[in-house]
Image (cartoon, rainbow, N blue to C red):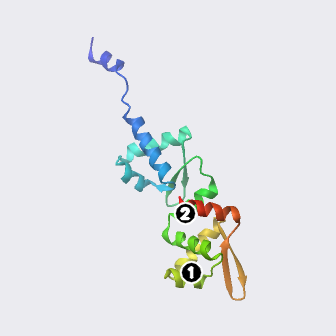
Amino acid sequence: MNGREISRNKPLPTIKVDNRYIVLNIIKNNQGIRYMELKRLTGLSYGTLTYHLTRLEREGSIRIVRSARMSRYYTNDIDDLQADIIECIRSRVCKEILIMILKYGTVTLDGLTKSLKKAKTTINYHIERLKVKGIIDGERVGRYIFYRLKDITIVNRVRDALSG
């Protein structure tokens, strides 16, 4: 008997499956997590993490939302609207805007600027992101635009995302 025959009969190590399980659980607990944060939390190398993410995506356990600058990782039970809400909530300024809208029903750019103590351009950038994603809309009254959540289902989903 040579060493090759012995090694072929050995069971394969389960460390890769354990790593995959760890990656999946971190994604479940941190929906919308980005690659570098996932790498930091798992302690895996780039190649190993990429391998497990690819396998999880092929298995249908996760979905990856890719944009020009970043990728975010979600479990497959998260739909597009929920993924957009989670992505916005992971941004501190966006989260504060959504909290203000939930609290007051409608808000203006000037009101958000004063309350959040941020530049108008910063607030406007995040408002545009929320409008493009279909989470909020605006109604002009005189010289002001009042922003609100689009409908009751979005209100409920934002509340759930903020509380979870």
In percent of the image, x 60 and y 74: which residue is there?
103
Image coordinates for residue 110, horizontal then vertical, percent: 58, 85
Alpha-carbon span between mark 2 and mark 1 = 19 Å
In percent of the image, x 58 and y 78: which residue is there?
124
Nearest to the observer: residue 46 or residue 139: 139
* Residue kind at label 2, given as amino acid type: Leu
In percent of the image, x 66 and y 73: which residue is there?
148
Asked if 135 appears above or below 72 in the picture, the reply is: below
15 on left or right of 133: left
Asked if 41 appears above or below 144 in the picture, the reply is: above
Residue lying at the far bottom of the rendered structure: 143
Asked if 150 appears above or below 64 in the picture, the reply is: below
61 on left or right of 45: right
Q: Dot 2 corresponds to which residue? A: 162
Q: Quadrant of residue 83?
A: bottom right
Give the label, 2 or 1, closer to the camera: 2
**Helix, strand or loop under label 2:** helix
Counting labels gives: 2
* Residue kind at label 1, given as amino acid type: Leu
In percent of the image, x 54 and y 55: which residue is there?
66
Image coordinates for residue 130, horizontal then vertical, percent: 61, 69
Image coordinates for residue 51, horizontal then vertical, percent: 43, 41
**Helix, strand or loop under label 1:** helix
Q: Dot 1 corresponds to which residue? A: 112
